[in-house]
Amino acid sequence: MKALLCPGEGVQLVDRPEPRAGAGEVVLAVRSAGICNTDLELARGYMGFRGVLGHEFVGDVVEGPGGSRPPAKWAGRRVAAEINCACRGCPVCSQGHGNHCPTRTVLGILGRDGALAERIAVPLSTLHALPDALEDEQAVFVEPLAAALHAFDEVELARKDRVLLLGDGKLGLLIGLALADRRDQVARALAVGRHREKLAILAARGLEVALEQEFDEPAGFDLVIEATGSPHGLTSALKAVRPLGTLVLKSTYAGDASVDLAPIVVNELRVVGSRCGDFPRAIAALARGQVDPRPLISERFSLEDAERAFARAGEPGVIKVLVDPLRAG
Amino acid sequence: MKALLCPGEGVQLVDRPEPRAGAGEVVLAVRSAGICNTDLELARGYMGFRGVLGHEFVGDVVEGPGGSRPPAKWAGRRVAAEINCACRGCPVCSQGHGNHCPTRTVLGILGRDGALAERIAVPLSTLHALPDALEDEQAVFVEPLAAALHAFDEVELARKDRVLLLGDGKLGLLIGLALADRRDQVARALAVGRHREKLAILAARGLEVALEQEFDEPAGFDLVIEATGSPHGLTSALKAVRPLGTLVLKSTYAGDASVDLAPIVVNELRVVGSRCGDFPRAIAALARGQVDPRPLISERFSLEDAERAFARAGEPGVIKVLVDPLRAG
């Protein structure tokens, strides 16, 4: 089958043997897969990953262990799959924190091939059936939307709160859409980014928006969500949170960040790291139309054109690029 | 009067006019003052402070506004004084967060002379009377002990918790003594530092201790308290916290820290900045003997010898240096 491989650095469209499902696994035929910033960073050497990229996707259950038929419950079902494949036996997993299982593999990120391919093998335990009403181009956002919604899990929004979102990249915009859905719960909800046309997507959903270039010194926010993907954004975020306020970090950077961290202590901030989120909640938010991510789709490519798709995903101004293995090249 | 001045960089023993109390203030005759790491950093240019250093001290109330007699309640009382002088009128102060008042001055740190002098003027609102049973050499620790105890304010200790303290400097050791007082509330309490003789003070109070050099890779701690004062300590701390665990930051660094912050997001850590604490609680902990900081006193100097005292405070292996203006030079 065709697959987009990260051989350590960069990407390469290769021919690979089709994956076989192990015990407790199934093989999915990928219908559509998104490219996210983590993929771009992996291709720059982040995590030292070597393998097939891709962890945002929708697919059909087509095969069980060793080429057998899949369990009846799942056969032919269209699904999204969680990216963390936990051992389900260790103390961390027993406490319900499988996303942090120390021996976990992660689709297309850590020790396991991803979804920018015709087929992918995943544990049954990671599957979530998708409602028929959800189109593939919505369902492909389940994973990043789950991560976006998770930004609000460690904070209790209050009516008087002023909320600032920094970053209008792929993840930033999804968080912005989720914030727009919560707009009436807070006193102020502002998104600051670098791209007028991207911010317009959030403005259309009722969010206050501002260009970073024109909005130099935001300060005094009760909650700041940092999703710029750059150390510069972290510096801005640390200045923007009021004393005793909360900063949610959604960005991982490849490499060390040189940042003045004194405000964390001087202003006694609470900084919360936030990664993966709850799939059923994201599926529900999409199904109810609370969040419509389709305006974020910049372009769609066939799997044959996956290298071009990957390059395009890294270009300025481009938001979400989808790769559709069922699409003719 | 004599005073230890920070003219922007370094320190200098100078002759200054005695301070006068403004409205709502009193003048204190300083009995004893401690030198802390913040003082050492201020003398290296941190915060751009110019003025008399010193914010850990005990003194007697000797004068009211404009040279008048002090209010009867305070006249002649031996007191500790909080370091943050808040406006008491702004929204932040109204919410009870005077320590974060945006127009606050801070004794010997920001816009206000400190206590390494014969006399100091402070707002009445900052005063805390000291029990007679407390010796000066205990009472001089009220401010740093309040800060040390504050490290535990944003965390709820659980029986199963493994707690790691990083740093055996002046503040680290006080936190260690406070942790020793909580030893029975947690499963494990470990202090890691660089000085065998300093750690021995904590070991004597029942804490498990280890030399950093001999304890390379601490990991899996539910709570880590970072008090090393170095970016290197932050890097170790971020590795030592378990996924979903808590890191309390007590250190401020002069300058930018180049640190891999990815663990905050990947492991979804909660990072809490912690600065100043509650004075009455610290006074009570000293009075009840829950924390005895006297083993931390390395040396005592007269005010005439304050420059030498300051140099001594910065030497490796030295813990707390006190300057006693009542002591003959």
Image: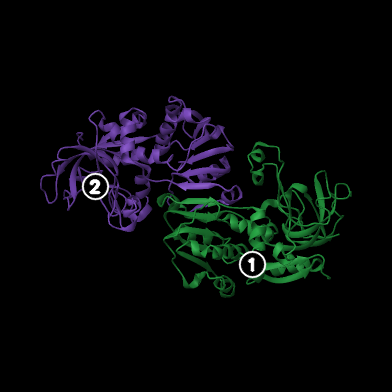
Chain colours: A purple, B green
> Dot 2 corresponds to which residue?
A125
Asked whether B210 or A134 is in front, the reply is B210
SS class, disc 1 = loop
- Which chain is mark 1 on? B
User: How far across and down, in percent of the image, does residue B74 sit?
Assistant: 80, 52
Task: Indicate the position of residue A165 as horizontal and vertical percent values.
Answer: 48, 36
Q: Which of A13 and B27 is in front in this view?
A: B27
- Image position of A297 (left or right of A248): left
Q: Residues within 10 Å of mark 2 (few under 14, many from 20)?
A: some
Q: Where's residue A77, x and y in %?
A: 18, 37
Q: Residue at x 26, y 30 (%)?
A: A134
- The residue that label 1 is drawn on is B292
**Vertical position of residue A153 compared to residue B304: above or below:** above
Q: Which mark is residue A260?
A: none
Q: Give the amino acid type for the residue marked by disc 1 in the picture.
A: Asp
Q: Quadrant of the N terminus of chain B?
A: bottom right
Q: Image check: B241 left or right of B139?
A: left
Direction from residue B322 to residue A275 in the image, left or right: left
Label 2: which secondary element: helix
Q: How far apart are marks 2 and 1 (CA)?
A: 54 Å
Instruction: Using the rendered view, name the quadrant where residue A296 is placed.
Output: top left
Residue B38 visible in the current orientation: no
